[in-house]
Amino acid sequence: MRQLVITSGKGGTGKTTVTAGFIALAGEKVVADADVEAPNQHLLLNPQLVEKGEYKGAKMAVKDAERCEQCGKCEEYCRFNAIRDMEVEPTACEGCGVCVFVCPTGALCLEEVTTGVTMISKTGYGSFSHALLEIGAEGSGKLVTEVRRNAEKIMQDEPLLLIDGPPGIGCPVIASLTGTDLALIVAEPSVSGRHDLERIHQVAQHFEVDALVCINKWDLSPEMSKDIEKYCEDEGVNLVGKIPFDPGVMDVYQQGLPVERLLQTKAGEAIAEIWEQVRGHLFQ
Amino acid sequence: MKIGVTATGKDLESQMDPRFGRCAYFILVDPDTEEFEAVDNPGVSAGGGAGIQAAQAFIKQGAEALITGYCGPNAFDVLAAGGIKIYQASEMSVREVLNHYKKGELKEISTPGKANRGKGSR
Amino acid sequence: MIISILSGKGGTGKTTAAVNLAVSLAAKNEKVLLLDADVEEPNAGLYLKPVLEESLPVSIPVPQIDEQRCDYCGECADFCQFNALAVAQKVVITFPELCHACGGCTLVCPKEAIKEVGREIGLVEKGWAESIGFRQGRLNIGEPFAIPVTRTLKEGLADIKDSIVIIDSPAGVSCPVIEAVRGSDFALLVTEPTPFGRHDLGLALEMVEHLGIPHGVVINRAGDDNSTVSELCQEKNVPIMLEIEFSSRLASLGAEGIPFSKALPYWQDRFYEVYQSVKEKCLCAN
């Protein structure tokens, strides 16, 4: 079984679209949406929910008002500004336990809290593992790991796990990358796209994950596309294709059409060619 | 003398779990008598540093050796500090792993595998 | 006045909006400070091309064990919720990259054998882009925690009385975003008229409502029919403060790193109007 993650660094480059194209093209597979903060893949796949799970992603300090003597030691020692006027502010609490330790009356304790929901769904394209993290909640990296673990759990003998990755280079991205067989970086032809491509590429190298690059909406700036091609050449990274800007893609989405329809667009044709290359690298 | 095997279930017929940090159970077994007990691995639900937590818990069990599929560099460092020898096996039942171990057929792991870092921290 | 620019969905045009707002206000002789709080992928500087004058490393305090005093009792490892410490026989191992810098281990150690030392995780840089004050934060590659960099970036903001502060926030609705926008007087949510834009706008609206920050929406890449997102705005009674129509001209200027309001000055008036509208709404909110 091989694991492929679609990643980008910069948001909005088209990970979900490229993943959707691959979903339509690849054979037997399981799909995972690792963007647990703002998942989008479910909007395209028409999933039927099979199993829901509570995600207890963090510990939070909880106060027993009856025991509190208002001494303020907790507020003094908390480094995260998570105790204000002697009340715990959940969006800031990191669950470190210092306040619990310093409280003279034992009025504080750490409790596991539900910070999100995991989902396993059926789609016309295979089983689908996804999740949604509560806004501002901690533990996105761990939830990404849960999503991947659920995907591995539901696999039967499909040869492929396709992971739609989150944007950025922080913890959830790291959690989506480590231990995969291959990362496809979707790059955007702009100065910020070029800049972010470098950073996500460095992350992949740091965590020893092989990476390929493709350029999406390449014709919005042929100059910047060339720049990215040069970067790939200089760094010895395989550029496996370029996808043209295609308003037809948005039409497919706006009309709520199934992902196979993407393949009939110009962009979709390019994605199909890229898939052939990616598949070759993945299963060689 | 006892050794530990990472396992997906609680008895010798269970499959060995190839991962150390987030395996479900440690099966601690005396290779001669085959007396065993299954212990929960606290690393399973760790936010970050699952391997470290698992290694600490494993050391406390007093086994001399660990048999698993692979373990990351953090867990490796902790296990090494605890004087634990680490052997590698592939996917098979705990009983089969034990048999291979008794015959001296298992390879010792002297360098850690690829890190699974950052899968939980935040 | 602190205005945050954010969006649930990535790539909708936060940086574009932030940069053009800054340029437009500066063109109208307002004093402006732009903060690039997207410390994982700071991009505003690519458009504004600032001259950087100051560079502050951002460190977080991580434990260092004095092994002379340590008796390997393991209290620190037992306490640490993040597994940043492990104790085995006669060895203590620290895992600084897991440390959340809470300071707890130094408190629980019965032998006072733990002190804290700084570990660099990123950088804050300050400078000027012509008349626009500029700050950006940058998280080192492979580091999981952005928030300490964001905090350092925002230090001293409350004392700035004479400039309009524009915060270019990261995408999404996670902790680093909340840290970036917390304390703002107004939030501009940038979205695009697509099902993805709508879905993620919903999340971003929830977040700013929870934080109690007055807000309005900017629709980027607007077309003839923006109902995908304008319907949600109507439903939630959120004002649409600007529509930036999609054009390949704007797209190529952006691709080249040129703030379009510099190349097309009539946009400066449009962005200035947004600012005046924000000011009005803030007065009402107070």
Image (cartoon, coloured by chain):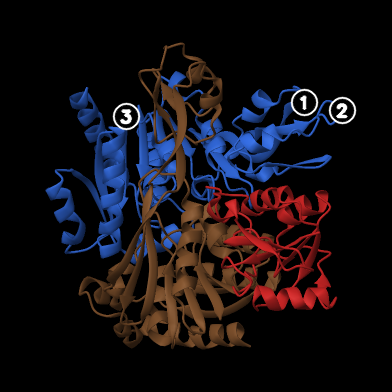
Distance in Å between CA atoms under marks 1 and 3: 45 Å
Chain letter of the residue carrying label 3: C
Left or right of residue C160, residue A170 in this image: right
Q: Quadrant of the C terminus of chain C?
A: top left
Residue C54: image quadrant is top right
Circle 2 residue: C68
Distance in Å between CA atoms under marks 3 and 2: 52 Å
Chain rendered blue: C
Work out whether mark 1 precedes mark 3 in sequence or the reverse, and give the earlier one.
1
Work out whether mark 3 precedes mark 2 in sequence or the reverse, and give the earlier one.
2
Give me the residue at 25% from left, 34% from top: C214
Left or right of residue A73, residue B71 in this image: right
Residue C115 visible within the image: yes
Circle 3 residue: C185
Residue A186 visible within the image: no
Residue C86: image quadrant is top right
Q: Colour of chain A?
A: brown
Circle 1 residue: C113
